């Protein structure tokens, strides 16, 4: 029996699945953009969907935004939110690898990122969830900072060249808040306070995390913002 008929059917079915997936993805992306626009409008913020490479360059000193190549922000929500200049956006970068036959493969990475601009410049501080990779880093000499709260030290990896600044930021109120919000990853450097996530968030999560960004900011001691 000839396999030509079944082979053609499988090929056509495969192409149909690819087309259907592309249509579904495009519709989902359009719906999410509409939801983000509605969110920004309701919050009195600006929304720009186009690729923004200037933003990637401007804040390229932040570790999460300095990865890979072909970096750009998009779906950018920005403006004054409860007295602070904030931004929330999707972010893209590429990495490359070779398969077993030496062929180059491009990998696209996407995630959501939140920024709050600070009125003063600060040293780099990273607060991330304690995990396998952070423990490996510690084994190679990249020690994190320990705190009086053993629970906090077990849950989070804190790194900074300025230990006093790390202790100022990770005060009792901040530690309690982070222990109640263990999914948060925080970076402070220069004039930026940032929250990073592993994937693109839905519109309701954008507003929720803008609020959490402000909650983190509210727990920074005000004496940090008093010029010496």
Image (spheres, rainbow, N blue to C red):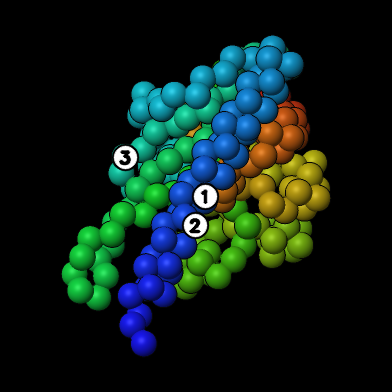
Q: Secondary structure at mark 2?
A: helix
Q: Is residue 51 left or right of residue 120?
A: left
Which residue, as the protein is rendered here, is positioned at the far front?
A: 1
220, 184: nearer the viewer: 184
The x and y percentages for residue 210 are 69, 30
Residue sticking out furthest to the bottom: 1
Q: Secondary structure at mark 3?
A: strand
Disc 1: which residue: 20
Identified at 80% across, 50% down, the residue is 180
Q: Give the mark, 3 or 2, whose residue is nearer the N terminus.
A: 2
Tag shown at residue 17: 2
Q: Residue at x 57, y 37 (%)?
A: 27
Q: Secondary structure at mark 1?
A: helix
Which residue, given by chain and number where applicable, does mark 3 sit on?
A: 70
Asked if marks 2 and 1 touch (Cβ < 8 Å), the reply is yes
Q: CA distance from mark 3 to mark 2?
A: 29 Å
Asked whether 13 or 187 is in front, the reply is 13
- Measuring 36% from the left and 28% from the top, which residue is drawn there? 53
Note whether residue 114 is visible. Answer: no
Q: Out of 216 and 23, give the one closest to the viewer.
A: 23
Asked if residue 149 lies left or right of residue 101, the reply is right
Q: Residues within 10 Å of mark 1 (few under 14, many from 20)?
A: few
Q: Quadrant of the C terminus?
A: top right
Which mark's residue is nearer the viewer, 1 or 3? 1
Of 144 and 67, nearer the camera is 67
Tell me how far mark 1 sits from mark 3, CA to CA.
Answer: 28 Å
68 versus 133 height, above or below: above
- Residue at the spot x=52%, y=50% of the render? 20
């Amino acid at each position: 029996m000839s396999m030509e008929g079944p082979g053609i059917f499988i090929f056509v079915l495969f192409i149909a699945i690819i087309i259907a997936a592309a249509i579904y993805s495009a519709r989902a992306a359009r719906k999410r953009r509409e939801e983000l626009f509605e969110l920004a409008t309701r919050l009195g913020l600006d929304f720009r969907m186009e690729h923004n490479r200037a933003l990637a360059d401007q804040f390229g000193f932040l570790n999460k935004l300095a990865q890979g190549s072909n970096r750009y922000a998009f779906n950018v929500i920005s403006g004054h939110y409860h007295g602070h200049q904030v931004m929330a956006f999707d972010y893209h970068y590429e990495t490359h690898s070779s398969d077993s036959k030496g062929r180059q493969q491009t990998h696209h990475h996407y995630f959501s990122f939140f920024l709050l601009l600070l009125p003063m410049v600060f040293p780099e501080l990273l607060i991330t969830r304690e995990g396998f990779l952070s423990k490996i880093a510690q084994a190679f000499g990249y020690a994190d900072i320990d705190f009086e709260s053993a629970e906090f030290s077990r849950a989070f990896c804190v790194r900074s060249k300025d230990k006093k600044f790390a202790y100022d930021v990770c005060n009792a109120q901040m530690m309690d808040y982070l222990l109640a919000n263990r999914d948060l990853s925080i970076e402070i450097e220069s004039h930026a306070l940032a929250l990073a996530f592993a994937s693109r968030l839905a519109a309701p999560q954008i507003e929720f995390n803008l609020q959490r960004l402000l909650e983190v900011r509210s727990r920074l001691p005000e004496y940090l913002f008093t010029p010496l």
